[in-house]
Image (spheres, rainbow, N blue to C red):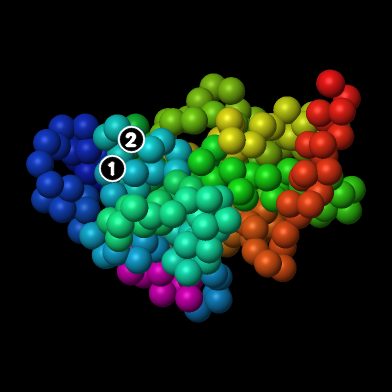
């Protein structure tokens, strides 16, 4: 039996009241508590929203700032680091309620909607500080090779692309398509920070056998672990700082087109 039933999916498209009034919310919360504990056991530096009321949301997603008919559970960098990054971006909170926003940071999201369940790494255009770090890192050949090795470890069920919105877009590639020839290099050469989403994830149909009540936690942890390798590769930290390479690239591009 699937952990999330067809009725759970359908409830998301018909609810008009509180998110917490939905039966699916309690299931998602229980899933979060188990997944969170396993994230800690694996020593992955991923954290839910620091405000309990915002850990599971229907109002915000890295994939779409105002999502429709979805429930989102996001894991991302710790609060102190998130505040530091937003300061480097020139963002100062107007007050406590306007503090750190999830969509300004790379996030690994679990998302349920009427038509699907997904586990996805999303870097929105508003997370441009980390996007620039990723672009700068890929200026170095050894890191492009390292990225390719990371992607080779993923199976062909992953979907990769630059689209925005909570639903799967037609303009995406599978992992195998992306690793064919120079496709990865050509796609990344067109990626524009502050304009494109960057995302990779798995999309499941409702009541997929992979999401059975017995197996869903293992499936979630397996996928989060796979995506965490890519998340850790691109995430800006003081020890993973490639902004100088990004700015050198940007300066050279402006000279070329001056």
Q: Residues within 10 Å of mark 2 (few under 14, many from 20)?
A: some
How far, Cα to Cα, is label 2 from label 1? 6 Å
Q: Earlier in the sequence, mark 2 or mark 1?
A: 1
Q: Residue at x 51, y 55 (%)?
A: 86
> x and y percent of residue 239 in the render?
72, 68
**Is 104 or 55 nearer to us in this picture?**
104
2 and 1 marks in contact (CB < 8 Å): yes
**Res 149 visible:** no
Q: Is residue 38 magenta?
A: yes
Q: Is residue 226 above or below residue 163?
A: below
> x and y percent of residue 82 in the render?
49, 61
Q: Secondary structure at mark 2?
A: loop
**Is 7 or 61 nearer to us in this picture?**
61
**Res 225 visible:** yes
> Circle 2 sits on which residue?
66
By secondary structure, the bulk of the magenta-drawn segment is best described as helix
Q: Residue at x 44, y 31 (%)?
A: 165
Q: Residue at x 83, y 53 (%)?
A: 143
Q: What residue range appears in magenta?
A: 32-40
> Circle 1 sits on which residue?
59
Question: Horizontal placement of 32 versus 26: left or right?
Answer: right
Q: Is residue 121 magenta?
A: no
Quarter-wise, where is residue 212 in the image? bottom left
Quadrant of the frame with the C terminus: top right
> x and y percent of residue 117 in the render?
39, 42
As drawn, the label of residue 204 is: none
Question: Horizontal placement of 122 versus 173: left or right?
Answer: left
């Amino acid at each position: 039996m699937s952990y999330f039933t067809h009725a759970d999916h359908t409830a998301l498209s018909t609810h008009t009241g509180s998110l917490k009034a939905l039966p699916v919310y309690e299931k998602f919360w229980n899933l979060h508590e188990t997944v969170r504990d396993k994230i800690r056991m694996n020593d992955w530096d991923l954290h839910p929203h620091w405000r309990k009321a915002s850990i599971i949301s229907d109002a915000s997603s890295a994939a779409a700032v105002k999502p429709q008919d979805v429930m989102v559970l996001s894991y991302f960098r710790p609060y102190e680091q998130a505040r530091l990054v937003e300061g480097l971006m020139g963002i100062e909170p107007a007050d406590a309620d306007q503090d750190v926003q999830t969509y300004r940071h790379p996030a690994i999201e679990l998302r349920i909607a009427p038509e699907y369940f997904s586990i996805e790494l999303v870097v929105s255009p508003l997370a441009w500080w980390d996007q620039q770090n990723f672009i700068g890192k890929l200026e170095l050949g050894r890191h492009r090779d390292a990225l390719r090795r990371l992607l080779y470890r993923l199976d062909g069920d992953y979907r990769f692309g630059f689209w925005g919105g909570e639903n799967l877009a037609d303009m995406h590639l599978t992992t195998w398509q992306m690793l064919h020839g120079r496709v990865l290099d050509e796609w990344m050469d067109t990626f524009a920070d502050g304009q494109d989403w960057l995302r990779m994830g798995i999309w499941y149909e409702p009541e997929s056998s992979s999401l059975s009540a017995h197996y869903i936690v293992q499936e979630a942890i397996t996928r989060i672990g796979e995506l965490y390798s890519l998340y850790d590769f691109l995430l800006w930290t003081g020890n993973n700082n490639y902004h100088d390479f990004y700015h050198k690239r940007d300066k050279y591009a402006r000279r070329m087109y001056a």
